[in-house]
Amino acid sequence: MSIQKRVAIIDNSIHPDIYDPVTHWSAFLSTPWEAFRAKDNILPDISRFSHLIITGSEASILERKDWVEEEVVLVRRAVENGLSVLGSCYGHQLLALSLAGPESIRRTAVPEIGWIPLHMEGRNSFLGQAKSAFTFTLHFDEVHNLDERFDVFASTKICPVQAFQLKGRAVWGLQPHPEITIDQGLKLLRDLIEAGAKSREGMEQALWSRPQDSGLIYPILINFLS
């Protein structure tokens, strides 16, 4: 028996008053959805859902909190059970950890902060048909060293794995935050600076730059939910 289309959002945020990924993602969802707080050890019953979104986090995937292992097990089960799965930023890294192991994640040599140009490979249309696009990002860890089971289809000069798909499956990881609008990105950077977050200089530089958003969220969700 098929399940009616329904999205589970695993909210990995630590301080949702500063970073609120559920608000960011749900603003673009017309499909019924429900959110679950991983930090509070509240995870979905995946038998009730057709799609799973794994959000970003202020946490580092390399300094894993006690709730992460249970989430990793759930993500593996979701993939095994045929759910469509989409991870963004921390969720992208957690998805790689779940499917490819700890050797697939590492600290970035240089953090990416602000609005960056992505280079897309034309063989995968998940991000649309353009060869390049701008989107918001904020990360200090990254995915690397994926094996032949994965198709890496977007990159930057700093981070070679900006997007991947588990070949033949509706399972995608995205390093950037296409769900964060320009206004939300500006507010997030200001709030993080005020809260004393690390890489203040990089965040200030991003605020001084001209924000550019190519609207990748729209082809992403069309393809994810189709």
Image (spheres, grey):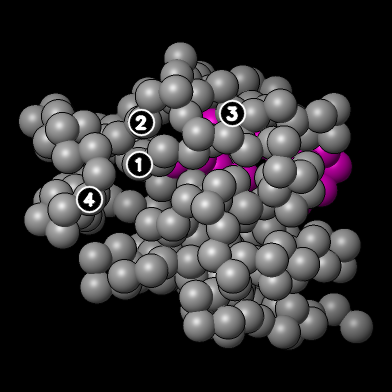
Residue drawn 30% across the image and 35% down it? 113
CA gap between label 4 and label 1 equals: 12 Å
Q: Position of residue 190 (x, y in %)?
A: 12, 51
Residue drawn 31% across the image and 72% down it? 16
Q: Nearer the viewer, mark 4 or mark 3?
A: 4
Q: Amino acid at mark 3?
A: Val
Q: Earlier in the sequence, mark 1 or mark 2?
A: 2
Q: Which residue is mark 2?
A: 112
Q: Earlier in the sequence, mark 4 or mark 2?
A: 2
Q: Earlier in the sequence, mark 4 or mark 1?
A: 1
Q: Earlier in the sequence, mark 2 or mark 3?
A: 2
Badge number at residue 161? 3
- 54 or 110: which is nearer to us? 110
Dot 4: element: loop
- The quadrant holding residue 59 is bottom left
CA gap between label 4 and label 3 equals: 25 Å
138 left or right of 95 in image: left
Q: Which residue is mark 1?
A: 138
CA gap between label 2 and label 3 equals: 13 Å
- Residue 149 sits inside the magenta stretch: no
Q: Amino acid at mark 2?
A: Glu
Query: In the rendered structure, are the residues bearing label 1 and label 2 in contact, judged by CB atoms less than 8 Å apart?
Result: yes
Q: Earlier in the sequence, mark 4 or mark 3?
A: 3
Q: Position of residue 35 (x, y in %)?
A: 51, 79
Above-or-below relation of 59 to 164: below
- Magenta range is 162-176
- The quadrant holding residue 86 is bottom right
Q: Position of residue 94 (x, y in %)?
A: 62, 53
CA gap between label 1 and label 2 equals: 6 Å
